[in-house]
Image: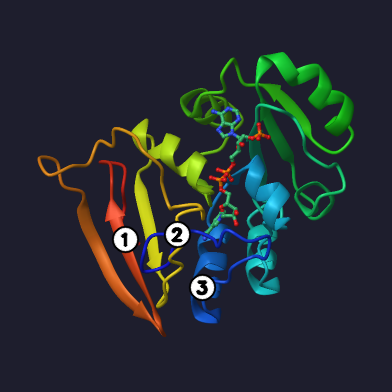
Amino acid sequence: MSIDGYLDSATDERLLLSNDADLDRVDAVRATCDAILVGAATVRNDNPRLLVRSQARRDERVARGLAPSPIKVTLTCGAKLDARANFFVTGDTDKLVYCASATVAEARDRLGSVATVVDGGQPVSMRRISEDLYARGVRRLMVEGGGMVLTQLLTDDLADELHLVIAPFFVGDSQARRFVGDGRFPWNQDRRAALAEARAIDDVVLLRYALSTRFRMD
Ligand SMILES: NC(=O)c1ccc[n+]([C@@H]2O[C@H](COP(=O)([O-])OP(=O)(O)OC[C@H]3O[C@@H](n4cnc5c(N)ncnc54)[C@H](OP(=O)(O)O)[C@@H]3O)[C@@H](O)[C@H]2O)c1
């Protein structure tokens, strides 16, 4: 996020917050995960591939009997996703779409050939997603945003660890998407999160918070 807590600008153009060294760190974290989740708005706005970029890391995963990149996961109410998006067409890995019950049929029509559409309930709950992913063998899930998804994950107290990276500039536009929206977060002045690490990575800063007893320092 920016110094003033934004994940993006309010314009259509994608805002680059990370630097190369941090993107490489994120790639290393991705390679250790079983699945990566982003919200449908991020799939639409950013058109991310969500793959492990480094060939060495992909090879290392394959040598461990895994797919080159983690399973890709998204969630949607409206099911307005394009089957030609990079999320669906890139990477030799499973793609899961958790969809609100009311639009499952529409989602299967549109995306059934490129992804597995799962009825996520009405509304879709992050807890239900995490339990379903667990049943599918996912033990380590990386949630890369955006703000709406992060807000639910954190307010539902489902995250074990938070990696907060601060880029050295301001966005200064309240129309832009913040890191999180309003909500009742489990961490407040009476229950402070544990800071596990603070590290400068070139011109950005990584703050790692331990949010549950499952957190392990690596
Ligand atoms: N800086 C970063 O690290 C970073 C990372 C990721 C994203 N971003 C930015 O964040 C922005 C998007 O963030 P955002 O907060 O607007 O959106 P988001 O969290 O990416 O996605 C929100 C969408 O996800 C679906 N969704 C969320 N919760 C749901 C639920 N409980 N049940 C069913 N569907 C649910 C809905 O999709 P439908 O509308 O399809 O129903 C909703 O509109 C983008 O501009 C992107 O650039 C930044």
Circle 1 residue: 208
Q: Is residue 216 visible?
A: yes
| Cα–Cα span, label 3 and label 1 | 16 Å
> Viewed as shown, does residue 161 lie left or right of 107?
left
Height in image: 92 above or below 2? above
In which quadrant of the rendered image does the C terminus lie? bottom left
| Label whose residue precedes the other's in the sequence (3 or 1) | 3
- Label 1: element kind: strand
Height in image: 162 above or below 166? above
The verdict on label 3 being within 8 Å of ligand 1 is yes
Pick the residue in front: 50 or 124: 124
| Cα–Cα span, label 2 and label 3 | 13 Å
Which color scheme did the rendering employ for the protein?
A: rainbow
In which quadrant of the rendered image does the N terminus lie? bottom left
Q: Quadrant of residue 50?
A: bottom right
Q: Position of residue 154 (x, y in %)?
A: 37, 39
| Label whose residue precedes the other's in the sequence (2 or 3) | 2
Circle 2 residue: 6
Indicate which quadrant contains ligand 1: top right
Circle 3 residue: 18
Can you tell which of label 2 and label 3 is closer to the viewer?
A: 2
Residue at horizontal 80 percent and vertical 26 percent from the top: 107
- Label 3: element kind: loop
| Label whose residue precedes the other's in the sequence (1 or 2) | 2
Q: Residues within 10 Å of mark 1 (few under 14, many from 20)?
A: some
Pick the residue in front: 5 or 201: 5
Q: Residues within 10 Å of mark 2 (few under 14, many from 20)?
A: many
Amino acid marked by disc 3:
Ser
Q: Position of residue 52 (x, y in %)?
A: 66, 63
Q: Is residue 140 visible?
A: no
- Label 2: element kind: loop
